[in-house]
Amino acid sequence: QKASFIAEIADDTSPQLGGVLATNGNNIEFPDSSGAEVNRLKFGAGDDVSVYWDGTDGHITTLGTLNIDGADGHEMAKFVDGGAVELYHNDSKKIETTSVGVDVTGTVQGDTFTLDNSSNDWVFSVSSNKLVISYAGTAKMELDTSGNLKVTGDVTAFGSI
């Protein structure tokens, strides 16, 4: 008995791979996705992970936690469905979002630190080896490396100065 042959793979409604798909230097391309069952790359028995482009943004959707691991198996990031985002350094969690903000394990380092207060932010910065505290863009206090403190405005003390 002769096997049937389909001239165009697009005509096959249930193609099967018996091995690795080689692209011979070409891309596998998907047009914009217009729905949950249209132009998406899916993984898992229940379509647990989906990768697609909606015409404006790229998306990776997952049921449960999305883990990003290095080729050597080290944890790099976790995205918990409806919960935390965790970032790792060498398998050690360093940053985690929480219901009230961010939790950092270790040292936080930066050039400036801004406390948001609408348009009147408090900014902590370093300039010419001085710690400068500013409010609404105006320096209010400077502390130099010798321990000298310069304050713009009144100083109220409840003890010895």
Image (cartoon, grey):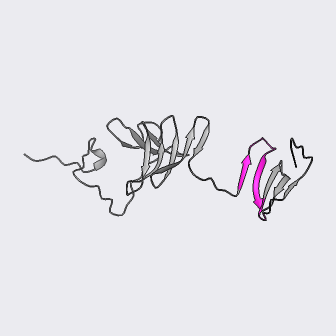
Query: Which residue shows up at 34% across the image and 40% down it?
Result: 44
Q: Quadrant of the N terminus?
A: top left
**Quadrant of the rendered image containing residue 23:** bottom left
Query: Which residue shows up at 29% across the image and 55% down it?
Result: 21
Rendering coords of residue 95 (x, y %): 55, 47
Viewer-nearest residue: 4 or 72: 72
Q: How many marks?
A: 0
Q: Is residue 40 left or right of residue 109?
A: left
Q: Is residue 106 magenta?
A: no
Q: Is residue 123 magenta?
A: yes
Q: Quick one: which residue is furthest to the bottom in this view?
A: 128
Rendering coords of residue 113 (x, y %): 71, 51
Rendering coords of residue 108 (x, y %): 62, 53
Q: Is residue 160 left or right of residue 104?
A: right
What is the magenta range? 112-130
Viewer-nearest residue: 157 or 98: 157
Rendering coords of residue 140 (x, y %): 86, 51
Q: Quick one: which residue is furthest to the front in this view?
A: 160
Query: Which residue shows up at 80% across the image and 63% down it?
Result: 146
Q: Quick one: which residue is furthest to the right in this view?
A: 154
Give the answer, above or below, for where 35 lies relative to 94.
above
Q: Is residue 52 left or right of residue 146?
A: left
**Quadrant of the rendered image containing residue 49:** top left
Viewer-nearest residue: 67 or 97: 97
Query: Which residue shows up at 38% across the image and 38% down it?
Result: 48
